Image (cartoon, coloured by chain):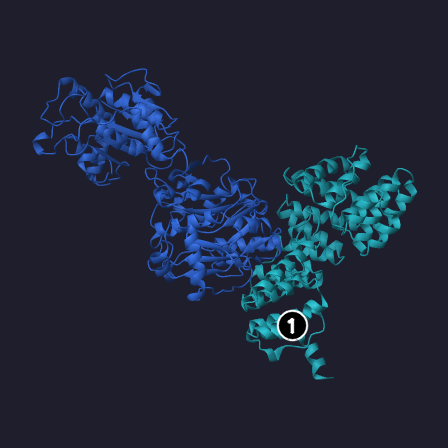
Chain colours: A blue, B cyan
Amino acid sequence: MFSVILYGRNDSHGYNLHKRAAISFNALAEVMSDPDDEILFVDYNTPDDHPTFPEAIHDTLTDKAKKVMRILRVRPDQHAHLRSKTHLVALEAQSRNVALRRSNPRNRWILYTNTDMLLVPRDERESLSDILGGLADGFYQVPRFEIPEMLWEAAFDRRDPAGNLAKLRDWAVRFHLNQVVHNYMPMKYDALGDFQAALREDMFAIHGFDESMILGWHCDSNLAARLALYRGRVDTLIDKVFGYHCDHTRVAAANNKGRATRMNDQDQYIWNVASPYVPAQAESWGWPEVEIEELRLDRDTAYQRFTAGLTSTIVPATLPFTTTSLEWQLYEDLTYDLPHTLPFVCDQVVTFPRSTAILVVATRPDFLSGFAKAWKNMGFTGPVLVPEECEGLPQNLEGVEHAPFSDLLGRADLFIFEFGLSTQMPSEPVRAGRAMAPVDRKRLRVVERLFKRAAAMEAETRPPARRMPRRFIGVNVIYNKFWTIFTDHVGANINPFCSQVLAGPPRQDDSVKGKVLRFRARHAL
Amino acid sequence: MSTSDILQAIGPLARLWRRAASPGDIVQPEGAEQHYRNGLMRMRGGNIDGAIEEFDKAIARMPTLADAVVARAELLDSQGKSAIARQEYERARRLWAEMPAGAPDRRYLYRRHGNFAFEVEAYDLVRSNVRNKILPQLAHGNALLGCGRAKEALNSYERALRVKPDLPEVLALKGEALSAMGRYEEAVQAFDRVLTAFLSDAETLNARGIALMALGRMADANADWRRQLELLPPGQSAARACVAMRQANYEVAFKEFGLALAKEPANAYWQLYRMTAGRLIGASLDPIALPAERHWPFPLLALRAGQATEQDVLAQGDTPNRRAEALFQLGVLALAGNPTVARGYWAEIAERGAPMLIEYAAARNELARLGS
């Protein structure tokens, strides 16, 4: 019957976002009763190494919310062409159009709202699907009522949507929440963007939201203006649904700077609108040619993929614990515990697109074979690329391609550089003062050289379609001789030694030292 | 002259000081729309009972004034009479849904259901507060045009054009208003300017076709509609079907109305037109399934099913547009047996029908084929 369209990213937009959003997702799912109903959440521009926002809070969502939710992930690289034109990190019009294009075509209605809204049918026996199913064609809005921050934060239970809706019915009366704020036509109400129900067919006819609105604010008013022209009327659903908003202005959100807030031009996008259509984007709205990843919370989750990958390559520990040490006298000892390290490596990659091509430059044969197996079993379809310059590594592994480094550099979406000892045996104690064998030294020199070249030449070797810098993952680069080498070239956070892994984009150090480092790295022999 | 007469005469001027409206400003109403307007003013002034009283009067004079029905419902709802209000909201929605909408190949503003009394008032208020902007004038004009008040709509569009002269979107609407007033030459000039700016504006091609057909420039009209048909995407089957029908291109119309009917099986017009196109190309047709709803165009389907006579349909064709639709169907039925009779029916449409009707264009094309 209807597709709810929401957007956001895995950040902290406004006060206690996680609670507001969980309350809202669960409440929206609660009022759905048609098997075709869906919540489309566009996760816009969350960093590649982070999970999407709904994944990050999945444990607070009801089974029903997980079942009806489809997450459409717009990657930073897909947003990169707009980055210089806006101060915002998440774009409403683009997000909502990406979802509209990919919404269930069997649904007659599209409902635009936000991740802090609860919709309360006035007749408790009716679902929102029932209500929309009985409506004549049109464009419908409801007034938004505010819930004081104390109430929703203190009294709502995220995982009890029915209880929350019941509480709202009670509070509405006890605390006089229901105040309709009228507005000029075509807006009709204040805060109109929290409930705009339009026919899917109409939204396609008018070319979706206006994607030139990239400075924030008034997207809802522009839509109201255009749909009001198209439909002639803005109808109310106040007789059937009340909409409540979890107020969150204790802390200003990123797009709210008081009177200094930058926003889309009101005259251009509201008062001088002259047509329902946006012909300039008639063919391109919602990015029909762009492949957008779709994720679910009820199946094939990142956790399931992560465990499938690791289970295929490491066996459970047989001892209560193992030991290592970061004492300085062990600075030269590059032994590490592979079964302990692989989960942290997989953690760095599991949120990337499945089609990712990963370049692995390594010394340890068991690292490559273990990682390649985990990679495949995590569901990645992109290849593991291994430079021919790396000697002593296993050949003919499934999904692994060997070629000269210079050929692979321009194909990789992501890099792993592993700094271990090729001679380390699985049964050896870790960080017990082991010296390097000559072959270890030789192979590490190759890894170091390729690492420096890759980091220094990242921008110029980037695949043509990519706009964002690629990420470098360093394995076994904490508290040993490769720590400084790695962090000279990669902007990584400080990580605990136990995780064994550092990661980040190439450093953009424009100081003389940085330039010298890059020059030497480019010509590393 | 009585006080009442004076107030009546200056009625429209009351809008000039609407921002400071008080119950004392209200003129004595004559018709439903004036009661409705007074109701809105009282509502804005906080006089709920007075507003309900005015809306009651408006509805008594014009029971189909859905805008008054819904305004009254909102007031009742706000007063806690939600059970009664709920029925009234539903009644208003039914009334709107039952209002006829224009053909889907026409400009968006003709494809809407409603009498737009609220919009006329609301956008009038907006344009008096948000000055020198396009949308308030344009939306006001559209609402007026939707009510059949083309002259006032033209005034609104011209005020919008003073803000931004030559804006093609507004010029197109000005052309529609001129066309609705029968000023077809001027309408064509306006549409020409729009099409110079937007070569592929399908809605304006349709509008210019209508104006050209009204001027008797049949070949030019058909050329515009052919171009419109090329531009319309395959998904818009109903629009494609209607514009094909205008050209009397029944092969395409038959196919497209079939697709449109698959999407909207309850649309009696699509069923009627598909049968019409099918008959004129000699296609084999399914038995007619008469709809349960008996309102127009049911009599035309009944005629086609042999369950109504010429006299029945002409009697029920109680508006000029319905009469034209009925005459067209009578012509289609007569054509095979007696083309002269068909010519007579269609000639009446060409003489007296509204040029925006599909039947008007199709009849003129048919007459041309018959050599009239």
Q: Hey, which quadrant is residue B58 in on the image? A: bottom right
| Residue in the foreground of this view, choosing between B340 and A62 | A62
Q: Is residue A48 above or below residue A166?
A: above
Question: Which quadrant is home to the N terminus of chain A?
Answer: top right
The answer to whether residue A260 is seen in the rendering is yes
* Number of numbered tags placed on the structure image: 1
Residue furthest to the left in view is: A329
In the rendered image, residue B50, in percent from the top left (x then y), is placed at: 61, 75
Could you tell whether A503 is left or right of A300 in the image?
Answer: left
Could you tell whether A435 is left or right of B305 in the image?
Answer: left
The answer to whether residue B353 is seen in the rendering is no
In the rendered image, residue A205, in percent from the top left (x then y), is placed at: 59, 45
| Secondary structure found at label 1 | helix
Could you tell whether A453 is left or right of B356 in the image?
Answer: left
In the rendered image, residue A231, in percent from the top left (x then y), is placed at: 61, 53
Q: Hey, which quadrant is residue B89 in on the image? A: bottom right
Chain ID, mark 1: B
Q: Hey, which quadrant is residue A107 in on the image? A: top right
| Residue in the foreground of this view, choosing between B172 and A197 | A197
Q: Is residue B102 above or below residue A72?
A: below
| Residue in the foreground of this view, choosing between A53 and A263 | A53
Q: Is residue B314 above or below residue A323?
A: below
Could you tell whether A363 is left or right of B249 in the image?
Answer: left
In the rendered image, residue A380, in percent from the top left (x then y), is placed at: 37, 28
What residue do we see at 66% from left, 63% from top? B155
Mark 1 Cα within 10 Å, few/some/many (few <14, many 20+)? many
Question: Which quadrant is home to the C terminus of chain A?
Answer: top left
What type is the residue that disc 1 sits on? Answer: Glu
> Residue under circle 1?
B54
